[in-house]
Image (cartoon, rainbow, N blue to C red):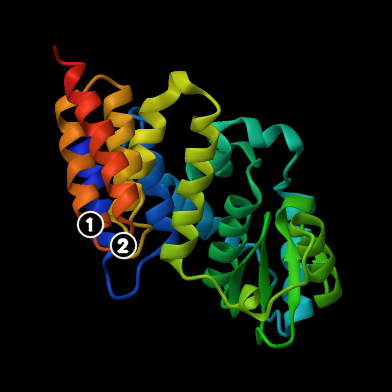
Amino acid sequence: MTDGGDVTDWRREFAEEARADRPDLARLCLLLGAVADPTVTQADLDAAEIELDRLAGLVPYGTRGADAWVAALADLLGRHEGFQGVPADYQRLESSLLHEVLRRRRGLPILLSVVWMEVARRAGAHVYGLGLPGHFVVGFGDPEDLHLADPFAGGRAMTGADAELLVAGATGEALDPSMLRPATPAAIVLRVLNNIRAWASARPERSDVALWAVELSLLLPSHPARLRYERAELLVQRGDFLTGAAEMEAYATIMDAVEPSAAETIRRKAKAARALLN
């Protein structure tokens, strides 16, 4: 690793961590931030890890029981350290970058949850993340018992009924038991990248952000196949017509066996992209 934020090195390290037997969530999020911000150095990543360790050291010794962990983390991270979110955070790319969230004490629900999870884990808690529709929260203890907290709200304690209301408000549907399965590090990072892609899609001038977010998503062991087509479209949008067209054609080959009509549409788009070279 070089001292500077070399994008190629950061991406290689991200890919290696993503494919590790037990991926480190904090490291994946920090490497993602290093790809996003070319000014980030290894020292910045080390400082972020040190901050997580420092916060974990402030958790009261001897904390036991899920409710006690929720109360202790809410007091430390929410009230004392000021980690929470506001609606304006959804408009900032920094809200999805862990090193910036640690600096600003502001972020999206999922990044604030990552802070909670990493601090609690270091302090010895049995903690997990729940990717509910529209809102990410954390849980403590046995996932069957649902001792939850909302880091975006400063650590407000939540019950199973609260989770049901949250899901109903976001989707208009009842909470499905599958929504209560603890999220894996890879699933959490993919959701972070999805948020970044959504942020960039509303800002066509930031197609550079959309492109690296898609490319990091493709480095994860499990990802939607359609991301390959999305990358191809972004390449064409950014003027790399030849590479974009070639990737469209490769994706069309995959689609032949699943949806031939869609494959033909993609080939027409690839042909149109190649025509832009003339």
Quarter containing the C terminus: top left
Picture coordinates of residue 139, whole percent (x, y): 67, 73
Residue at 71%, 56% (x, y): give it. Answer: 151
Residue 197 in view in this figure: yes
Per the image, label 1 sits on a secondary structure element best described as helix
Picture coordinates of residue 73, whole percent (x, y): 71, 64
| Residue identifier under label 2 | 258
Using residue 242 as the reference point, say whether residue 189 is left or right of it.
right
Residue 215 in view in this figure: no
Front in this rendered view, residue 131 or 108:
131
Residue at 36%, 59% (x, y): give it. Answer: 223
Can you tell which mark lies on residue 254?
Answer: 1
- Residue 244 found in image quarter: top left
Q: Is residue 92 above or below residue 53?
A: above
Per the image, label 2 sits on a secondary structure element best described as loop
* Closer mark to the observer between disc 2 and disc 1: 2
Residue at 50%, 31% (x, y): give it. Answer: 201
Residue at 28%, 32% (x, y): give it. Answer: 269
Front in this rendered view, residue 210 or 92:
210
Tally the numbered discs. 2
Front in this rendered view, residue 11 or 241:
241
Distance, label 2 to label 1, CA atoms, is 8 Å
Category of crowding for the residue at label 1, using alpha-carbon neighbours closer than 10 angstroms: few (below 14), some (14–19), many (at least 20): some
Q: Is residue 96 above or below residue 217?
A: above
Picture coordinates of residue 24, whole percent (x, y): 38, 65
Three-letter code for the amino acid on which mark 1 is drawn? Ile
Three-letter code for the amino acid on which mark 2 is drawn? Val
Using residue 256 as the reference point, say whether residue 149 is left or right of it.
right
| Circles 2, 1 touching at the beta carbon (< 8 Å) | yes
- Residue 208 found in image quarter: top left
